[in-house]
Amino acid sequence: MGPFLLEPIVCLKRGRAPPADVEFSRRMSATMNRAPLAATACLLASALLTACTAAPEPPPYKPLASVKDLMEATVQPAADVYWKSVSTTVTRDGVEEKFPKTDVEWEAVWAAAVTIAESGNLMMMPSRAKENDPEWLKLSAALVDAGDLAAKAALSKNPERVLEQGEKVYDVCTNCHRKYITDPADTAAQR
């Protein structure tokens, strides 16, 4: 027995009522002995309620395009705009430098880069991501990063940076196509 209960028992054996503070101590001791049980019951109830709640509903988006469709309708046209925005052509007549000159032209290059970046996110959606293939997610994330840097280059309105970032976008695309496009006709169709 605990020390709180010893004195009331001694008093009761001698025929006396325990003092009021001893009675309080006895009740507190009984309450304290039940506290761990009550806490355990609360934790168990909380765990059960958490386990029984319904899983959150999936996001409301509805992917419609396949990966191939997304490439043909979104990525390839955006990449073409970006890659063709800056060029240097050497002919017999001299060197021709091509790059955006107006704010509207630069904005089109920026929009193409943003489209490329966001397409990487679209590639990671569950209906398009290759199951249990971390390389797919890695390459999709690399497309997001390359597109982001390409967009920043377009915002700088620096043709050299756009050309440099365009090469990085091309490298990401090429690495992905080497791994995932097995039909040469698909590769030719995307050029």
Image: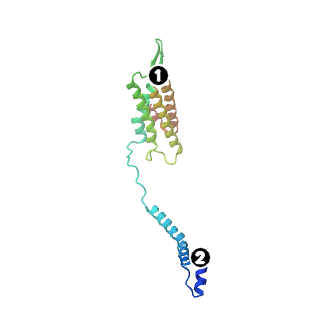
Q: Identify which residue is drawn at 46% across, 43% down.
A: 124
Q: Which residue is mark 1?
A: 87
Q: Is residue 68 visible?
A: yes
Q: Which residue is mark 2?
A: 4
Query: Quick one: label 1, few (<14), some, or many (20+) residues within 10 Å?
Result: some
Q: Quadrant of the C terminus?
A: top left
Residue 84 percent across, percent down from the top left: 44, 25
Q: Quadrant of the N terminus?
A: bottom right
In front: label 1 or label 2: 2
Closer to us: 89 or 35: 35
Residue 160 percent across, percent down from the top left: 50, 23
Q: Residue furthest top?
A: 93
- Quarter location, residue 32: bottom right
Amino acid carrying mark 2 in the image: Phe
Query: Quick one: label 2, few (<14), some, or many (20+) residues within 10 Å?
Result: some
Q: Identify which residue is drawn at 43% across, 38% down.
A: 118
Residue 136 percent across, percent down from the top left: 51, 42
Amino acid carrying mark 1 in the image: Ser
Q: Element under label 2?
A: helix
Q: Element under label 1?
A: strand
Closer to us: 34 or 188: 34
Vertical order, 185 against 27 (above or below): above
Q: Identify which residue is drawn at 49% across, 67% down.
A: 42
Q: Identify the disc placed on residue 55.
A: none
Q: Is residue 2 visible?
A: no
- The answer to whether mark 1 and mark 2 are in CB contact below 8 A is no
Which badge, 1 or 2, is on the more N-terminal residue? 2
Q: Is residue 168 left or right of residue 70?
A: right
Residue 161 percent across, percent down from the top left: 50, 26
The CA distance from mark 1 to mark 2 is: 91 Å
Q: Residue furthest bottom?
A: 15
